[in-house]
Every structure is written in structure tokens, then in C-alpha cells.
Amino acid sequence: MANSFSNSGQIGVVYNFSELINTDFKEKMNALCWYRNLDGDFSEIVTRLSLKENITEVYPEDLIELKLSEKGDKAREVILNDLKLLTDFGAFPSLNLLKCYERDAEFDFISTDVYSFHVDRSPIETDTFLCTYHGAASDIISNDQAQQKILIPEILTKLKDLHTGSSEEFENFLKENYFDLHYQPHTNVKPVNLGVGHLWRLAVDHPKQQVLPCIHRAPVENEGEYRLLLIC
């Protein structure tokens, strides 16, 4: 099965769930893709669901209650199976119908919302799993294509001006406000789009991680289109 992802060394491609969870990250590889061409009409599921807020969590029972066509039913089976695989693995997957995420407009010199390139951090050994079934998909870039925003001199200066505590507390200030998780891509970097239907596993910053965490961002949503996203 051919895949459309360039081989920069960052992305490993697998073709079943067992390979997805059992393949180790190594060297520059901090993103794994279970590459899939899914059957089913996922847009039908989106049109049958009700958006209660900008982000509405969808539960298995919500999917089961939907009256769907044969193609819609195939899409539902895929989603329910993905939820079961991840749950049986010990993860806590969430299926979200999404209009948009909240924007961070507090500071004009640094953004800490999910539309900004960032890494995930966890105190325990874990990874981020995600799959976009419908709508715009997330992007990733390799770690050598970006700079941590807190290392950019003009941003660092403004953060120091913002900080009211002692210099010894400054590092904790950066972590508590998630400033240290966000990255600025270098000029002319072309992100890799994760596409629709593929189940991804991204490396997270945690004490036992052997590779650099994967830098990623949420996409700007397509006008008038909701996203259907599995994430954990």
C-alpha cells in the first residue's frame, strides 16, 4: 500500500494497530502512522450529530443511536473499533465533534493555543493518539525545523518583563503557563499534514521518553465544516 508521507526520518508507517503500539520511537522518528484508506461515509455521521458547544464529546452510545445508511454504518464501525482498540490498550480516547478550539488572545507576542505549533507533556509514560475522520487535519514538523519560542530573544525578554517573581522561579513560570511547549517554525518550512483516516501516535515529552517530542498543531478549520476527531 503506497503512502503519501515523505520519508524525512520523522515518520514511521505501519499497517495495523499492533505495529502502531509496539513499534519503538528512535532517533529522529517521533511520529507513527497507521496508514489507512477507510471505507464509509464519515460526513454522514457529522451531519447526524448535534454540536452543543464549540467542542462536543461524542460517546459510543451516541454513535450507536444514529440511524445511518450502509456507508454511514461502515464509518461508525470503524470509529467504534478504534475506540475499543485504544480503550483495551489502556488509553482514554475521546471522540470530538469540533467547530473550533478556543483562541489564546492574552498576549500579542506569544500564543499558547493548539493552533500554535507545540508539544504535549505528561508526567507519566504515554503517547498522543489522534485520527481525523472528517474535516481539516493536523500538521507536524520535525524538531530541526523549529525553535522553542522561549529561546527567541525578543520573546524571552517580554516573558521576563511579564514575570513578577524571582529569577529562580522563572523556569517554573514558563512551565506553569505552557510557554515552554510552543515552537516557532523556521522560514519556508512546509508542515506534513496528517491527512484523514490515518491513526497517528505522536511522541510526548515525559521522563522516560527516548526521543524528542513531536511538534504539531491543530489546523484552521475549513469554512462551514466541522471536524470529527479522535484523540487521547
Image (cartoon, rainbow, N blue to C red):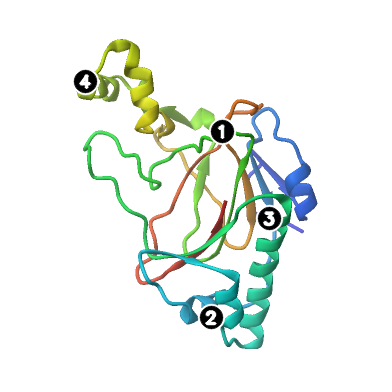
Q: Amino acid at mark 3?
A: Leu
CA–CA distance between discs 2 and 3? 24 Å
The residue under label 1 is 213
Q: Secondary structure at mark 2?
A: helix
Residue 210 in sight from this viewpoint: yes
Query: In the displayed structure, would residue 99 be above or below residue 106?
Result: below
Q: Which residue is mark 4?
A: 164
Residue under label 3:
86
Report the residue at 40% width, 70% height from top. 225
Q: Which residue is mark 2?
A: 44
Give the number of the mark in front: 2 or 3. Answer: 3
Question: Measuring 68% from the left and 66% from the top, which residue is drawn there?
Answer: 37
What is the spatial separation of the Cα atoms under label 3 and label 1, in whole angstroms?
Answer: 21 Å
Residue density around tag 1, few if under 14, some if 14–19, many if 20 or more, within 10 Å: many
Q: Secondary structure at mark 1?
A: loop
Of marks 4 and 1, the one in the foreground: 4
Q: Amino acid at mark 2?
A: Glu
Label 4 or label 1, whichever comes before in sequence order? 4
